[in-house]
Amino acid sequence: MEGTALAVCEILRYLIIHWKCETAGLPKGALLEGELVISTEALNSEHQANALHCVTTIASAGSHCDGFVLKNFLKEIQSILPGLSAKLMWTLEETSSSPNTSGVSPFQMIFEVDEKPRTLMTDCLAIKNFLHKITMVHPKIRFHFSVKVNGTLSEEIFGAENEPILNQPNGIALVVNYQRYVSRPKFGVTELLCGRIHPVPGQPVTLSIPDDVAAVGLLGELILTPAAALCPCPKAFSNQMNRISSVSVFLYGPSGLPLILPSREQPTTVFADISCFIDWKKYHLCVVPNLDSNLDRDWVLPDVSYRVESCDGDQSQIIDPQGHTLLLFLFVDFHSGFPVQQMELWGVYALLTTHLNAILLESHRVVQDSVRIAVDQALEQHHQVAKAHQKLQASHAVAVNSIMSVVVGSTNSTFRKMCLQAFQAADTREFGTKLHKAFNEITQHRFLHCLGGVKQLPPEKHDVAQNTEDACESCSPEHLPGEVFALRVSPGLSWGGVQVKTVTSAFHCPTAFFHSSVPLGFSGFLVPLWAFWDSSRHPSQKLL
Amino acid sequence: MAFAPMGPEASFFKVLDQHRAFLLADLRRVGEETPRGGTRPYFSTEVLAAIENIIQDIIASLARNEAPAFTIDNRSSWENIKFEDSVGLQMVSQCTTRKIKSDSPKSVQNFALILKILSMVYKLVQSNTYATKRDIYYTDIQLFGNQTVVDNIINDISCMLKVPRRSLHILSTSKGLIAGNLSYIEEDGTRVNCTGCSTVSTTDALTGCIKYLITDAKFLLIVEKDATFQRLLDDNFCSKISPCIMVTGKGVPDLNTRLLVKKLWDLFHIPVFTLVDADPHGIEIMCIYKYGSLSMSFEAHNLTVPAIRWLGLLPSDIKRLNIPKNTLIPLTKRDQMKLDSILKRPYITCQPFWRKEMEVMADSKMKAEIQALTFISSDYLSKVYLPNKLKFGGWI
């Protein structure tokens, strides 16, 4: 990754660390709140052929910004982005006094870069994935991300305010809406009866920092806290699926920020062979790295991904991709809280990323034990659910056969007739089929009852304006999948000759945040930037 | 009965006859009209209809998309038991129940097994054939798991349908034995005589195949252990104290043995005595014959004989007869717990003499087997102890 994406991610990291430092006095587990706007405007470059001149603005409202710190940050970021042949500017809107005074004041950071259209597209997808990963653990931070290419606008809002979250023992929140982690169309709505994942935390372990890593400045005591979950929830998956087909690993650093920035390369060699931390044979799984790093999808791309293959040696036989995904979250943080200087914390990320391999291997045994405990518990739950399901099925088969035996063998015509009529069956064969189905349905009904029901999610619609009203009627705040609003860029439109596919997610936005406008001859919608300003919202929610 | 060997002279049975008269007077006073020959037989059609009703309810539940469930009385809970002196332990009319659900992994297996056995009972009754509990278990060992599961479900079904187990056409293999002044005719006309040294299994009593029971026994002696039973047979006890009948359930009695004892009482109203070890286990076995068991309380009317008296071995006999102390056994912790449990049971309150004997045992912290009497002399039991007890009314 280079250029726009790297710069945006580093800047976002810095800002969030800054917010975190500002809220250091809040109790552990308090959620970080804020809003950021990231907008990129790209026009055909006047200096380079087949390139776009991209101006990216990152703006934040309601942030305490110290001008002096910001200047130092600019120096630092330019030093770590030497490849970014860009102009980096910042403006601090002065409300009353000099920039050196601290106070609630919005700020903007702007940088420019020339990029190929394909690079820009990749960068946008990478940024999107990065924002996904941030909102997974910071559900109350909202990002407005827009890209305008030669006048055509595409926008997306990232946030998880109304999604179910789990506060973990390490103080980090985790969004547990399953749709974040797997493809939604994979599991039909009628089949899925629990929309959450249920992470199982592992025991936090102290990581030893190798001497050579400490020598380069990574000091302090690091703690690794793993968490494992199966997605979707195995408890309430009504069909017979109980296979694990993939493994996804997510790495987070201090302040709950993604440790790994998107890259075409594998982030760290330690995960090339994850079996050094997890004994897959114990779970009868054969995993191989999944090299599919396609960012263009609705759910988050993990830092490391594996697929499960058949263990009988036939490499061509891949496990049905419809199986569960084992999610493994690894949170790395400092034991004694934040370093005094926030710049140090921001700098730690670079060191952690570079030396993560060495750090984890140095504490290989404790990491392995801790991960194993979490994975064992997550899979044990899966195993128990599968066992319970098998028990139900086997017993229902016995019940059906027994009932059939009585009904078929009865010489009481009134009794037989009443039994057949109850299921509107024409004959005993049809009766048997319906009887079996009835037993299956009561099992599903039980899960629905126990889990408090899951609202039927409205069908995926791309025509947002028509369906916003429908979505509002059928969704409740408890079950809203997330306020991610998407516009689809017309496939007929091109960015510098490259066909642009859908850049947005399939979630529904219940809020009439954007005004629709006159379509410009294609199936997408154009939403002007001024639409961010919605006078009907609370003034504090204005962004610019 | 002319076939009976000559026993002691008539004066020997004077006290016994007086006791019998007392029992008959008591029966008349209570106004009990015990149907002779046993309880009301359930017709096959009734059983089939009861099962069909259950199936229909299940289907109706499923048609409403509701998970069907069985509601089973908690047979083995003291809170569902009341005590009546004339009957023994029996279930209360409004008892607590438990649900066996079809949509819970914890209970679905039980639900299915109940249905399975119901369907098997349906077939047995329809075809007028019989099977033992063991036969049922062996139809699918993997499915049932163990015999106890089958036994419990059969009892639950009997309780749920309010139908005696024998009406479900399910037999239990009997381990009991009977000997003495009793004869009967089997269904095929065969005449069976229990006199002499022969013993007969008590299985046949359950099927209702036996008819025309004939006896002139002066008493029925229930013996706890098979060893004691055999010893008495070897000593020719039935001939020496003829006319009498001896029965053993070889420990905790099975249903057939209890049914037979009940049948003999209902038919002949002869005094029934128990000969058990002077230990809590023996006392509990005696209570089962007399007052019934917790698990079968729903069939108390068919199984209990409240008129039973405790003949021996009484804890007070140990001191009275100077039974050597080295033949006695200390009560274990388990014995103590069982003794405490029996003392708290509702029927002990109307048995002050039994209570006193148990308190003697509790105070001495010792127990004794019947075999301890052999330390006095090898045939003391059959030659001295029992004859004296029977002649002079040494029962409580």
Image (cartoon, rainbow, N blue to C red):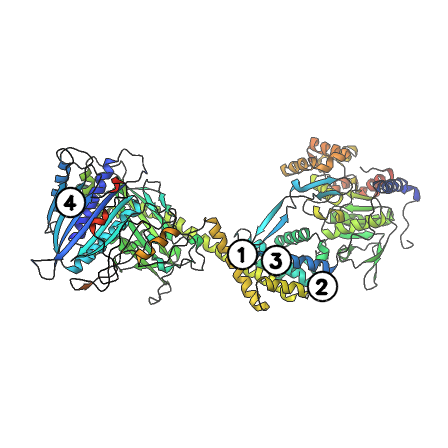
A97 sits left or right of A180 in the view: left
Q: In which quarter of the image is residue B3?
A: bottom right
Mark 2 or mark 3: which is in front?
3
Q: Is mark 1 on a helix, strand or loop?
A: loop
Q: In this view, does A45 lie above or below A33?
A: below
Q: Provide the residue designation for mark 2.
A: B129
Amino acid at the residue labelled 2: Thr
Q: Residue B65 carries which label?
A: 1
Q: Which of marks 3 and 1 is nearer the N terminus?
A: 1
Marks 3 & 4, CB-CB < 8 Å contact: no
* Chain hosting mark 3: B
Question: Mark 4 belongs to which amino acid?
Answer: Met
Between marks 2 and 4 in the image, the one whose residue lies nearer the viewer: 4
Location of mark 3 (residue):
B115
**Residue designated by label 4:** A109
Left or right of B382? Residue B160 is left
Are callouts 2 and 3 both on one chain? yes
Disc nearer the start of the sequence (1/2): 1
- Chain to which the residue tagged by mark 4 belongs: A
- Relative to A29, does residue A237 appear above or below in the rendering? below
Contact between marks 3 and 1 (CB within 8 A): the answer is no
Label 2 or label 3, whichever comes before in sequence order = 3
In the rendered structure, which amino acid carries the disc numbered 1? Asn
2 and 3 marks in contact (CB < 8 Å): no
In front here: A111 or B143? A111
Give how far apart the Cα atoms at labels 1 and 2 are: 36 Å
Decide: marks 1, 2 in contact (CB < 8 A)?
Answer: no
- Provide residue A95's location: percent of width, then percent of height: 16, 36
Query: The residue marked by circle 2 belongs to what chain?
Result: B
